[in-house]
Image: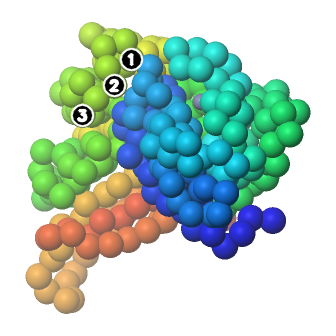
């Protein structure tokens, strides 16, 4: 069973993993903390982008010889394949790590991931430690992998003439770009959410996005490495994606209104489309922010 110190280290690793949101795709955002043999934190790291060192490698580099006999606390199962970076399970073994604490098993490892080989090498391994909390950073990567297409978030604000994209109208919404890979604008422009955040060999964006069907577009984006796509526009832009039930999340910026009582017509009531439920609500300057997610198994109370 994970110790209280290991749980603290895992929450630190989860926070570290979030540094990679919006830049590691198609790789997952992962964080790692190394505790020495006495349980003291001696190194930490995260994966920043494809082609660069993995979280475990960075954390071991920071820990140096203090890692020997220590524990590696990592949000995703250490990798077992030799790619551009050496397999992390081997780095951990070579560093003399004696225990590895993992939040989430790698869904791509099919039971043949780093955990097996670590155990064979005599390393004590514990899995499923704070897995639900690690999913706060890893879930969209995992969902995109399962679906074979990016996870789509529709972002909009309400104006007197209807819905429109939020990114150009509500400055507070622009932080959403930091955790996305690409953004589709209402005029059909498609670009990296943070320009040049993925390196030159990731995120190949179609030059004619609106001439492709939604299916073709999402396949092209996925093969280019995009795992999180923002749809920033009104109903016209979102319609085709909504019709095919492709939008997973909504972030709506609803302008605050002056009077505490006002008349309203039925047509103005809809906050989010049918098929979605509210997941969170907060305020930013001048706006109520509504978060919503698609019901995964049909809409309760609706056919
Ligand atoms: Zn790795």
Secondary structure category for the residue under label 2: loop
Give SS at disc 1. loop
Residue at 68% in and 19% down: 81
Q: Is residue 41 above or below residue 242?
A: below
- Image check: 261 left or right of 92? left
Q: Which quarter of the figure has residue 194? A: top left
| Residue 247 visible here | no
Labels 3 & 2 near each other (Cβ < 8 A) = no
Q: Residues within 10 Å of mark 3 (few under 14, many from 20)?
A: some
Q: Are marks 1 and 2 in contact (CB under 8 Å)?
A: yes
Q: Residue at x 56, y 49 (%)?
A: 66
| Residue drawn where x is 49% and y is 50% of the image | 43
Q: Secondary structure at mark 3?
A: loop
Q: Gap in Å between the C-alphas at discs 3 and 2?
A: 9 Å
Which residue is the site of mark 2? 198
Q: CA distance from mark 1 to mark 2?
A: 6 Å
Q: Nearer the viewer, residue 231 or 83?
A: 83
The quadrant in which the C terminus is found is bottom right
Q: Residue 164, percent across and down?
A: 20, 46
Read off the residue under disc 1: 202
- Which residue is labeled 3 in the image? 194
């Amino acid at each position: 069973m994970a110790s209280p110190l290991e749980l603290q280290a895992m929450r630190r690793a989860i926070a570290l993993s979030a540094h990679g949101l919006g830049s590691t795709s198609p790789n997952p955002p992962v964080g790692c903390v190394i505790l020495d043999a006495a349980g003291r934190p001696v190194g930490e790291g995260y994966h920043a982008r494809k082609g660069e060192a993995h979280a475990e490698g960075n954390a071991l580099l920071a820990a140096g010889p203090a890692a020997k006999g220590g524990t590696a606390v990592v949000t995703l199962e250490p990798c077992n394949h030799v790619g551009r970076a050496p397999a992390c399970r081997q780095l951990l073994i070579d560093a003399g790590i004696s225990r590895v604490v993992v939040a989430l098993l790698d869904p791509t490892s099919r039971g043949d991931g780093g955990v097996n080989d670590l155990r064979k090498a005599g390393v004590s391994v514990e899995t499923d430690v704070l897995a639900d909390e690690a999913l706060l950073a890893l879930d969209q990567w995992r969902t995109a992998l399962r679906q074979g297409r990016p996870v789509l978030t529709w972002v909009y604000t309400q104006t007197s003439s209807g819905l429109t994209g939020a990114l150009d109208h509500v400055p507070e919404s622009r932080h959403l770009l930091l955790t996305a890979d690409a953004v589709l604008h209402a005029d059909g422009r498609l670009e990296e959410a943070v320009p040049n955040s993925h390196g030159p060999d990731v995120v190949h964006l179609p030059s004619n996005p609106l001439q492709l069907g939604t299916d073709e577009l999402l396949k092209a984006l996925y093969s280019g490495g995009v795992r999180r796509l923002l749809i920033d526009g009104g109903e016209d832009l979102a319609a085709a994606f909504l019709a095919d039930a492709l939008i997973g999340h909504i972030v709506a910026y609803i302008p605050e209104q002056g009077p505490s009582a006002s008349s309203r017509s039925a047509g103005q009531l809809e906050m989010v489309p049918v098929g979605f439920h509210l997941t969170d609500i907060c305020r930013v300057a001048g706006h109520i922010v509504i978060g919503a997610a698609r019901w995964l198994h049909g809409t309760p109370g609706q056919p």
